Amino acid sequence: RAQIMLEVMDFLDEICGDKAILGCGVPLAPAFGKVEYCRIGPDIGKGWEMGSGKMMNMRERISTKNAIENVICRRHLHDQVFKNDPDVFMLRDDKCKLDEHQKHTLFLINHVFGGLTFTSDDISEYDEETMDLYKSVFPHHEKEILNVKQEDGIYEVRFLMLKSEYLLATNFTDDKQKYSLPGGKYYYRQRGFVPGRTNLELEPFQSHVFL
C-alpha cells in the first residue's frame, strides 16, 4: 500500500507539471516534496470537541482542539517539505458552536502557523467588528516561529513577522488560568504597553498576542 501511495503521488506530480497542488487527507510522508501545500491535521468541528470521537480516543477525529494541536505540533514540516495547510477557521455565529475565545484562538493559530488559510464563512454576513478582525491579517506576511513552550495547558509562542517579535499566549484548558509574561516590555492593542512579569488571567481557550 505504501508503494502504491508513493506511485500515485509521483503520477500526480508528473501530470500537474508546474501547477500548485493542495494535498488534503493524504498520508503525509508520501506527499513530502510532491505537493506545494498539504493539510496536516483533521477537520475542525462546529464545536470544540466531538464527544464520541474523543471518548473512543480517535486520533483523526473531527475536533477543533485536535486540529489546532496538529497545526502547532507539525509546524516543523512547514517550508521544509510543503507549506502547511490547517483546516478552515470560522468567525461566524450561524451554525457554529464555538465561543468567541475559541473562534479567536483558531483564527490566530491558523494565521501564525499556517502557510495557507481558508474560511468556510460567508464573509458578506460579518458585522463591522468581525470584518475588521478578518481584514487584520491582510496582506499575508510570513512568520518565523522562534520558540514554542507548553506548560499547564498554556502554549507560549514567540514568532517574528516583518522583523518584529511577537508573543502569543493561549490557554488550552477548560479552566481560567494565570499567566505571567516573561521579562521585557510588551504592547497589547487592548491595554497599551504592559511591563514584563505582569500576571494575566486567561479565560478558557482565550488567546492574546503581544508585540
Image (cartoon, rainbow, N blue to C red):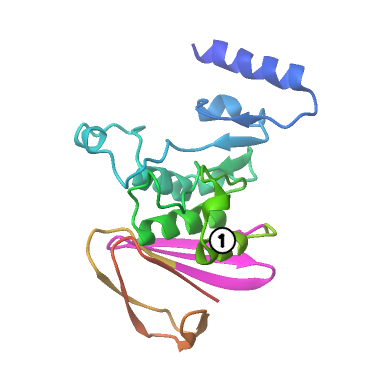
Taking the spot 57% from the left edge, 44% from the top edge, the residue there is 118
User: In the shown orientation, is residue 162 left or right of residue 98?
Assistant: right
Residue 106, image x and y in percent? 44, 53
Q: Where's residue 190, x and y in %? A: 47, 80
- Look at label 1 and name its amino acid: Met
In the image, 130 versus 152, the foreground residue is 130
User: Within the magenta stretch, is there residue 146?
Assistant: yes
Residue at image location 59% in from the left, 45% down from the top: 78
Identify which residue is drawn at 44% across, 60% down.
104
Specify start and end residues of the magenta stretch as a single range.
142-168
Q: Quadrant of residue 170?
A: bottom left
Seen at 38% across and 85% down, the residue is 197
User: How many numbered marks appear?
Assistant: 1
Residues 149 and 181: in front is 181
How packed mark 1 is, by other alpha carbons closer than 10 Å (few <14, some 14-19, many 20 or more), is some
Q: Is residue 78 above or below residue 161?
A: above
Q: Is residue 204 left or right of 12 when viewed as pictured?
A: left
Query: Can residue 87 be found in the magenta stretch?
Result: no
- Where disc 1 sits, the SS reads helix
151 left or right of 183 in image: left
The kind of secondary structure the magenta stretch mainly shows is strand
Q: Tell me the quadrant of the picture where the C terminus can be found.
A: bottom right
- On the image, the x and y values in percent for residue 145 come to 56, 59
Picture layout, residue 59 above or below residue 203: above
- From the image, tell me which residue sits under label 1: 131
Outermost right residue = 18
Which of the 4 image quadrants contains residue 208?
bottom left
Q: Residue 46 location, x and y as percent? A: 36, 42
